[in-house]
Amino acid sequence: MSRRPSIVALIPARSGSKRVRDKNIRLLCGHPLLAYSITSAKDSEIFKEVIVSTDSNKYASIAEKYGASVPFLRPPEFAQEHSTDIEWISYTLRQLKDKGSEFDCFAILRPTSPFRSKDTIRRAWKVFLDAGDVDSLRAVEPCTQHPGKMWVIRRNLLIPILPYENNGIPWHNSPYQSLPKVYIQNASLEIAWSRVALEDNSISGAKVVPFVTKGYEGFDINEPIDFDFAEYLVQRGAAILPMCKTVR
């Protein structure tokens, strides 16, 4: 592709959160949580459009207030607790295509990662473009608990998750220093070619390039206490939130 690929930001904000009621619009330092993802997406200036996918007219109104587009509501069947990402993403891309808006790529920017900045997004986009022949990019960070030290219980016995050995020594008996570095995905950012979703029915495909987040870029809000900790980080100057403002 000789031209620079087009990309759309997709911000998922269903209304049925169980652990924290109305989590995606709960206030964090004076603004609804989803406002920070909208702001960082718009400020990054890489997206042709910033779209919020929601099943709620209330959420849609708030998203539009901060400058996002909500061209249609997500159907209820794609907004359930166990709904998969590929369902709402495929639906959104196909609806946009039917309305005359096609994009080469899409990015998933979940509202629960408020410390993902415009610079985070720009770095990730560059990594994705520079990677060449890949299907997608996914944000990861080093594991704090190594799977080599983890177990499952079967018939009241411990079975190691990693049954392999490290030079003849089981992983669970090896010192941490000798274990391979392992990364865990976080929810802050994913980028993929639209064809991966539309043709392969996947949000990641087979070839996934890593994007290692820094500091609190991958911090994820899922519990009420996470809101408290996020505000604590901001108050201490340990993390910075995007500067939100309403557009109407």
Image (spheres, rainbow, N blue to C red):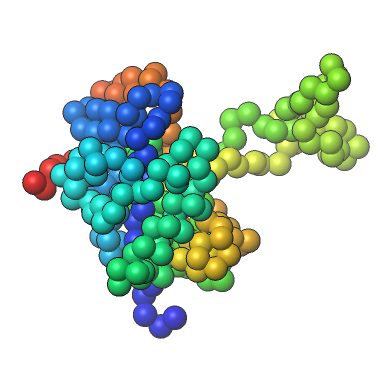
Q: Nearer the viewer, residue 23 or 162?
A: 23
Answer with the quarter of the image where residue 151 lies.
Answer: top right
Q: Is residue 161 left or right of residue 114?
A: right
Q: Position of residue 192 (x, y in %)?
A: 48, 61
Answer with the quarter of the image where residue 36 lies.
Answer: top left
Q: Position of residue 162 (x, y in %)?
A: 79, 36
Position of residue 69 relative to residue 170, above or below, is below
Q: Nearer the viewer, residue 77 or 94?
A: 77
Report if residue 143 is visible in the image: yes
The residue most toward the left is 248
Answer with the quarter of the image where residue 24 lies.
Answer: top left
Q: Which residue lies at the image location 59% right of the left edge and 35% below the top edge?
A: 143
Q: Quadrant of the N terminus?
A: bottom left
The residue most toward the top is 156
Q: Is residue 180 left or right of residue 90?
A: right
The residue most toward the right is 168
Position of residue 15 relative to residue 91, above or below, is above
Q: Which residue lies at the image location 52% right of the left edge and 46% below the top edge?
A: 84
Q: Is residue 28 left or right of residue 123?
A: left
Q: Position of residue 158 (x, y in %)?
A: 82, 21
- Total marks drawn? 0
Q: Position of residue 82 (x, y in %)?
A: 52, 38
Q: Which residue lies at the image location 55% right of the left edge and 43% below the top edge?
A: 185
Q: Nearer the viewer, residue 127 or 28?
A: 28
Report if residue 229 is visible in the image: no
Q: Nearer the viewer, residue 10 or 129?
A: 10
Position of residue 180 relative to residue 171, above or below, is below
